[in-house]
Amino acid sequence: MAKILMKGNEAIALAAIKGGVDAFYGYPITPQNEVPEYLSKHLIANGKVFLQAESEVSAINMVYGAAGAGARVMTSSSSPGIALKQEGISYIAAAELPCVIVSVMRGGPGLGGIQPSQADYYQATRGGGNGDYQLICYAPESIQETIDTMKGAFDTADFYRNPVLVLVDGLIGQMMESVDFDRPVKQRILLEKSWATNGTKNHPGSRNIANSLHLDPVKLEEHNIHLQKKYKLIKQNETQVEMIHMDDPDYVIVAYGTMARICRSAISMLNEKGIKVGMIRPITIWPFPEQAFDQIPSTCKGILCCELSMGQMLDDVLIANNGRHKVGFFGRSGGMVPDPEEIVDAIVNFKDKVVK
Amino acid sequence: MEVKYQKSVGLTDTPLTYCPGCGHGIVHKLVAESLVELGLLDKAIAIASVGCSVFSYQFFNCDAQQAPHGRACAEATGIKRVLPNNIVFTYQGDGDLASIGIAETIHAANRGENITVIFINNAIYGMTGGQMAPTSLIGQKTTTSQDGRVQALHGSPIHISEMFATIEGVAYMERVSVYDPKHVIQAKKAIKKAFQYQEEKRGFTMVEVVSSCPVNWGMKPTDAMNWVKTNMIEEFPLGIFKDKGDQNA
Amino acid sequence: MPKGKVTFDYERCKGCLLCVVNCPKQILYQDMKTLNKSGYNIIKVSEPDKCIGCAFCAMMCPDSVITVEVEK
């Protein structure tokens, strides 16, 4: 398939089909509506399952059911809707069921707005649900990268039997770019889902149960320890980061998604001013690319964390930096998207931005 | 001598965790016996809800999933859509279905989801220690209506069977009870029919079982069954509220 | 009248008496001297030959304690 011009949300939907999705359960919410709209037409057309649920709470529990039954299943929503899904996501992670969740972030808190935002970083990486669990969280910066992430997301979810969250924002969802759907995807060796609850006639002699209840604290702790081992493995194998101009930079910007794209322009403008600025761009925000910070030379004057929020990834930057460099923060929220000049100014006046 | 009645193979050997004389145990047998007699056990998937029956995934001798409180019908929908030829049923109490999960249940019914819902109405939250439920009777004392349920404060008992009879997608809706052998026999007929309709892909089927909660009602099990007979049935009349089978049978 | 025989899996019994009160022949009673491992007083048959194998007791038992056999 040659390059085609496509809207982000629709590209997410088509990429899911290319990724082998069997079922979609969702609910309308701006700015992601084109995902279910596209899928409502194309999934049913080729014999797959599409269902608009009565609420996001219901939708995520439909995902739980289908995932437990062995289907490659997804949902998509936006910030407040993802908030409603948190309990279900915790159950899915606890029961170790694979699924793909797409969040097209909008301004918050509360009903907030519908413009792009990154104010759900905590929700995505610290978990809005109860208990010690983690989602594999991708934060692509372009429609192309989102497509490539989506196509591989179902295999990743199946491989680790864990929910995968693909986190974009309203800008990526709503804009159009020329994209290629035929880029290769990481091949994974996937086991047969012998654990799926599809009736004992398919696995005589044993009962398959999807469950997260362990009243016995000994068993529940064992389960938690087991989950942590899995998360450690994911950290080792799945952390993805892009680093640019990291050879002796004056400053290093840390940004992801749409903010990272704006920072690319700012970096070239700063270069013209003779200020060398590198960038660490997390592609997975969980696992967070801590090792990348070891690449920052001691001569670097400071790290600027840039987000479309009031500062959430900032925590991880401070942790990863571990006091080695000064850390500054630049953020816009509420759906305001900065011009590159604002970031240039933030670097030039870095000392005013320092938080620690 | 020939065996006329014995423990169903539709139940596992795990002892039930229900209190002595609780109606849940009786209904579990009826569900298990129905699935076995209809030859559906090995393609059945049970959805346990949250409440006293949360452990039902340990008792039904088939694949199972345990759903968050109130979400069993959504989970069942998610499964049934990807496994249309399996038999999917939820087993829910009145807190799970008539309170937190009423939206999921109504919409599964409204979509005519081809699942079966076994709804146990014992007018109280059992697992959490006896709080008022949407089906608690006026005047009924519970730990959260300690002077008795008052309509002005707490509203009236909710009538699920009557409500669901108005929904187009419902193929079969019957309210039964298990307070004596005659009614247990009738309840089994209803449950078996509900699974039969599911197998015939007729749409949403539900059986509401008016049952007892001896411990939280503060009664002996035998008195609790009498209380069902004298008090509950008056508020929750038994009968078939909808049967699509008759129309095109 | 058909002849019936009931046997109890005593360890599953919780002493709820639903079987006792629903036996049409009133031949079941709770033996207050015998406990099962869970500490419940178990149920016994006072006059086994009066059992008609109706299985009402077994139907009412929530814990599948009772097996009923009838003469062919």
Image (cartoon, grey):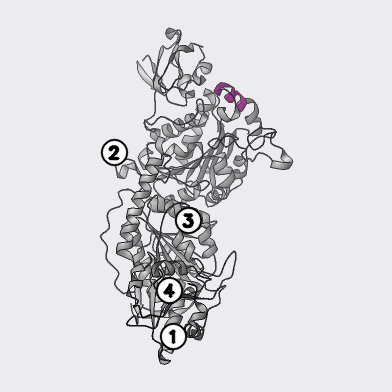
- Residue at point 37%, 33% (across, down): B12
| Residue indicated by mark 1 | A265
Q: Which residues are magenta?
A: B219-228
Circle 3: residue type: Ile
Horizontal side of residue A35 vs A113, given as left or right: left
Q: Where residue A220 sits: x, y (%)?
A: 39, 44
Establish whether labels 4 and 1 are both on one chain.
yes
Q: Earlier in the sequence, mark 3 or mark 4?
A: 3
Mark 1 belongs to which subunit?
A
Residue A152 lies in quadrant = bottom left
Q: Callout 1, which amino acid?
A: Ser
User: In the picture shown, does residue A267 fall above or below B176?
Assistant: below
Give whichever of discs 2 and 1 has the lower sequence position: 2
How far apart are the alpha carbons under marks 4 and 2?
49 Å
| Pair 2/1: label in front | 1
- Of residues C70 and B211, the one drawn nearer to the viewer in this rendering: B211
> Pointer 2: what residue?
A205
Between the C-alphas of marks 2 and 3, the distance is 31 Å
Q: Earlier in the sequence, mark 3 or mark 1?
A: 3
SS of the residue at dot 1?
A: helix
Give the CA separation, mark 4 to mark 1. 14 Å
Label 2, residues with CA under 10 Å away: few <14, some 14-19, many ≥20: few
Q: Main secondary structure of the magenta part?
A: helix
